[in-house]
């Protein structure tokens, strides 16, 4: 079970991922996202498939941020992506934020066994490894993801009168 502070941190990470996955729509009010971001504790794959079907009903792909209660400030323990294409649900588990040297964000899947890129119409999965270092890309991606979440958490704290000292773990 998540504490109120933990829920605020999860909310910040979810908003950060929404911005990374769909930056143009994240800035527009009343627009339908092409990627739905959901966060919570670990869930079974069947429930993840159900969430993908729910997202698909609104013509969106799904990103699920998996958190461990008590460790929300460290960010998601794992990131899962799912989409429904031609009636078939595709799920990639154990993804991580990844950024190329120019800073473009992706999700790298299962230790370099594929890359999820973001487009105006949703996510795109490509098998194979990136051409640049996986470890360096993950470090860049995690730092960028965490920085976005920190700025959102600060804005949430300010707007809701929460403790401004509440921070994402360094």
Image (cartoon, rainbow, N blue to C red):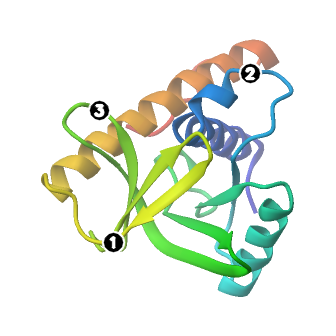
Q: Quadrant of the C terminus?
A: top left
Horizontal arrangement in the rendering, residue 84 relative to residue 56 (left or right): left
Horizontal arrangement in the rendering, residue 34 relative to residue 91 (left or right): right
At numbered mark 1, what does the secondary structure look like: helix, strand or loop?
loop
Lower sequence index among marks 1 and 3: 3
Q: Examine the image and state in which quarter residue 115 appears.
A: bottom left
Depicted 126 relative to depicted 154: above or below:
below
Viewer-nearest of discs 1 and 3: 1
Residue 28 disc label: 2
Numbered marks: total: 3
Q: CA distance from mark 2 to mark 3?
A: 23 Å
Residue drawn 77% across the image and 14% down it? 159
Residue drawn 49% across the image and 29% down it? 148
Residue indicated by mark 3: 103
Q: Examine the image and state in which quarter residue 45 appears.
A: bottom right
Residue indicated by mark 1: 127
């Amino acid at each position: 079970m998540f504490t109120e502070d933990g829920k605020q941190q999860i909310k910040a990470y979810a908003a950060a991922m929404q911005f990374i996955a769909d930056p143009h729509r994240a800035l527009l009010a009343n627009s339908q996202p092409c990627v739905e971001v959901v966060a919570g504790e670990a869930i079974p794959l069947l429930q993840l498939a159900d969430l993908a079907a729910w997202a698909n009903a609104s013509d969106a792909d799904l990103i699920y941020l998996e958190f461990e209660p008590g460790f929300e400030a460290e960010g998601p323990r794992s990131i899962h992506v799912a989409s429904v294409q031609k009636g078939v649900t595709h799920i990639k588990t154990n993804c991580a934020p990844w950024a190329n040297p120019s800073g473009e964000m992706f999700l790298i899947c299962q230790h370099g066994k594929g890359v999820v890129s973001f487009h105006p119409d949703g996510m795109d999965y490509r098998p194979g490894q990136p051409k640049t270092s996986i470890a360096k890309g993950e470090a860049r991606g995690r730092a960028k993801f965490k920085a976005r979440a920190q700025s959102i958490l600060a804005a949430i704290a300010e707007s809701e009168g929460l403790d401004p000292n509440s921070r994402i773990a360094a």
